[in-house]
């Protein structure tokens, strides 16, 4: 990832998965959304750095992003995203982020919260990060509820 590309956030967790593979990471910049299988040696990490994060947090996020992107699985430009459907995990059902473009649908899912209590915080960071990238195109709780403000 170019050093001058503005990073918005990074989420990397054993509780995320794409398909049958547990352990996944998502990197969001001002220009693109990328995903990658989490290397077994990599710790879980999440950071929302879009507004006012400490420089040390931004540096750590960039290091994790570069580690993840060595084995990049998907990449979509922010401009090509038509909609992102988002659901937080519950006690008995997992959550998800579904990124839709005109010709692709990318689904990243989570474990249920009783298996991984930390996953709720991870998904909160992912939601804020995706909102910073796509704005009103992020929908939660079903396609009819657009996110207006996350604070």
Image: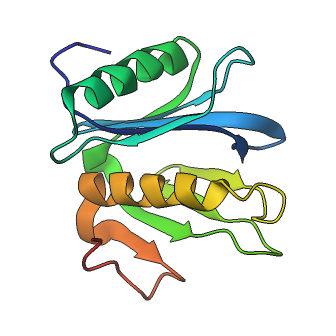
Q: Residue at horizontal 22%, vertical 40%?
A: 53
Which of the pair 99/45 is nearer the observer? 45
Query: Residue 93, percent across and down?
Result: 79, 73
Quarter of the view holding residue 18: top right
Query: Residue 123, percent across and down?
Result: 54, 57
Q: Residue at horizontal 15%, vertical 45%?
A: 52
Query: Residue 32, percent across and down?
Result: 32, 36
Which of the pair 94/104 is nearer the observer? 94
- Judge whether residue 142 can be spotted in this image: yes
Q: Residue at horizontal 71%, vertical 14%?
A: 41
Residue 148 higher or lower than 36, as above or below: below
Left or right? Give the position of 134 relative to 114.
Answer: left
Location of the C terminus (image quadrant): bottom left
Location of the N terminus (image quadrant): top left
The extreme bottom residue here reads 144
Which of the pair 26/114 is nearer the observer? 114
Quarter of the view holding residue 95: bottom right
Left or right? Give the position of 24 relative to 68.
Answer: right
């Amino acid at each position: 990832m170019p050093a001058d590309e503005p990073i918005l956030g990074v989420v990397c967790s054993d509780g995320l998965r794409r398909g049958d593979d547990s352990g996944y990471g998502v990197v969001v910049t001002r220009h693109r959304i990328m995903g990658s299988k989490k290397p077994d040696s990599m710790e879980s990490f999440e950071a929302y750095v879009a507004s006012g994060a400490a420089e040390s947090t931004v540096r750590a996020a960039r290091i994790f992003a570069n580690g993840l992107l060595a084995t990049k699985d998907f990449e979509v430009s922010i401009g090509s995203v038509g909609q992102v459907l988002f659901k937080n995990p519950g006690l008995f059902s997992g959550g998800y982020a579904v990124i839709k473009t005109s010709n692709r649908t990318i689904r990243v899912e989570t474990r249920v919260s009783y298996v991984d209590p930390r996953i709720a915080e991870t998904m909160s960071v992912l939601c804020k990060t995706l909102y910073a990238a796509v704005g009103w195109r992020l929908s939660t709780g079903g396609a009819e509820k657009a996110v207006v403000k996350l604070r």
